[in-house]
Amino acid sequence: MTDFLAHLDTLLLWAFAGCAFVSAALMLVLRQPMRVAIALVSCMVFLGGVYGLLGLHFIAAFQVLIYVGAVMVFMVYAIMLLDPRDESGGEKFSKLLWPGIIGLSLLAEALAVGYWSDLPPAPRGAAGEPFDMIRFSQAFLSEYWLHFELTSVLLLAAVVAALAVIKENRRHDHG
Amino acid sequence: MIADLVISLVFIGYAISVLMGFGTILTWVERKQAAVMSDRIGANRAYIRIPGTQVKLVWLGLFHGMADGLKMLLKEDFKPRTYDWYAYAVAPWVVFTPVLLVFAVIPFGGSLTPARLWEPLSAFFGDKTWPMQIATLDAGILIVFAFSGLTIIGAMLAGWSSSNKFSLLGALRAGSQMISYELVLGLTVLGLILVYGTVNLDAMVRQQSGIVLGFLPAWGIVYQPFAATLFLAAAIAENKRIPFDLPEAESELIAGYFTEYSAMKMGLFMFAEFIEIAIIGALFTTLFLGGYNLPYMSDAGFAFPGGAALALPHGAVVVTQLGTFLLKVFLVCSFQILIRWTLPRFRYDQVLMFAWKFMFPLALANLCVTAVVVWAVRA
């Protein structure tokens, strides 16, 4: 019993990681937009669980708060409004299915051989001190502020670009 | 190790029974309080007859909750021919589960030392002390917001997958309303985080057991009365109850996003709403009303402003704290029901205007003033 409890968090970690992997795979395989969104939501929540088990409670909270609470809510909202019941593209798989699978497995093998074996063991939050609000804020505002600002500028540029693309298409439609 | 597991299981059991208890009791309180407010008798028909006699136990209509539960379990489980059965089936759980999970980070009592409660317990538990909270996470309030964001997805999924125009309209309204008010809710709490300098809910409650200005208990509502009002209003809107119940306005949309749900699946939506009343009560108590402590009280006992102190035994403190928390939560719930039976419903554009043009600027102003004052006091 004590033995089981000592390994409980490892067990939970693997369970969460497995669920996150399965939902990520489902997100790629499923074809209906809303189900893809649900799979992505569950992937985010399980990843949050993984962060939480590693002792990074803040990252876990932000993972769920930002990705699920903000980003995915808007995606689900958009899918609900547009309600894309597009039945086109009846072919279930592309012609490049087999080359794709072979390429993926080759990539996975290359990663496993060249990269995975050299990885340091995963840091465990339980051993060190918890990654609390103060450490998080200091790291965020002293080391990563530039990355954060650059990312937001990049996102703004992406939004503007998306708008430009839509406008260009509309002009073609009318003209 | 096993002692930790036992304590956690006891706490989880306590939390679930408290929430389920509140969910059931509040359905009764809602009816009875409405009746009292409008000078009626209210629910009094459900009874249990003692077998073999003509004695009928009515007990002020308390059995109506049981009758409701039984009715929902026994009704036909109607399934519409929807476009997406999976989303339809999973939606009630996406609404219900996060509501329960939120309670995990709320401290419902101070610290518990089983050995000091009853001597023989020390053989098993040692003299270890546990905080009365299921998950002592330093991210506290952030976890609450993370989970409450999930319920929005559940409401939208339910409305979308029902393939019913009323449901879709309800989901649309629920989505935009909850997104808007979630923002206000977050902004009001930010001011409180500035004052306390922490997001850990247990640390917040411990700071509130002090005294401010010589005699007032250092509760959140004393520091941030304005934020407390905004928080409660935004929380009621987040729970989609009158005056903000546009997503399920029965005179316009039948039952809004859960029109196509029947039997216990519909019961889950209703139950989630009533449990959320209790969750809002618990959050408001923890953030603004000093949590599980009576005024001038801490884990050691009472320390009155005049300098007088009263030390209490550990068992008395634990019982007082548990009781105080439940009482405060119940009072806040009752206040929410009072509002529900007092105000008429908004129009839909008014709801969104109220969020963005009235509450959002006020919450921002509150945050700015708080930031300046905190900076001036600390400097």
Image (spheres, coloured by chain):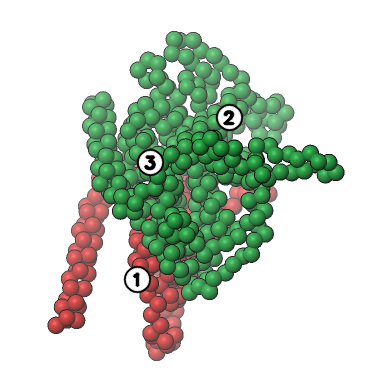
Chain colours: A red, B green
Residue A11: percent from left, percent from top: 57, 57
Residue B333: percent from left, percent from top: 50, 38
Left or right of B101? Residue A90 is: left
User: At label 1, which amino acid type do we have?
Assistant: Leu
The numbered disc on residue B233 is 3
The local secondary structure at tag 3 comes to helix
Residue B101: percent from left, percent from top: 52, 48
User: At label 2, which amino acid type do we have?
Assistant: Gly
Mark count = 3
Q: Which residue is mark 2?
A: B323
Q: Which residue is mark 1?
A: A82
Q: Give the mark nearest the N terminus, 3 or 2.
A: 3
Q: Is residue A67 above or below residue B277?
A: below
Marks 3 and 2 close (CB-CB < 8 Å): no
Q: Residue at x 19, y 81 (%)?
A: A173
- Determine the chain carrying the residue at label 1: A
Quadrant in which the N terminus of chain B is drawn = top right
Q: Is residue B9 above or below residue B250?
A: above
- Determine the chain carrying the residue at label 3: B
Respond whether the residues carrying marks 3 and 2 are from the same subunit: yes
**Local crowd at mark 2 within 10 Å, few (<14), some, or many (≥20)?**
some
Left or right of B373? Residue B208 is: right
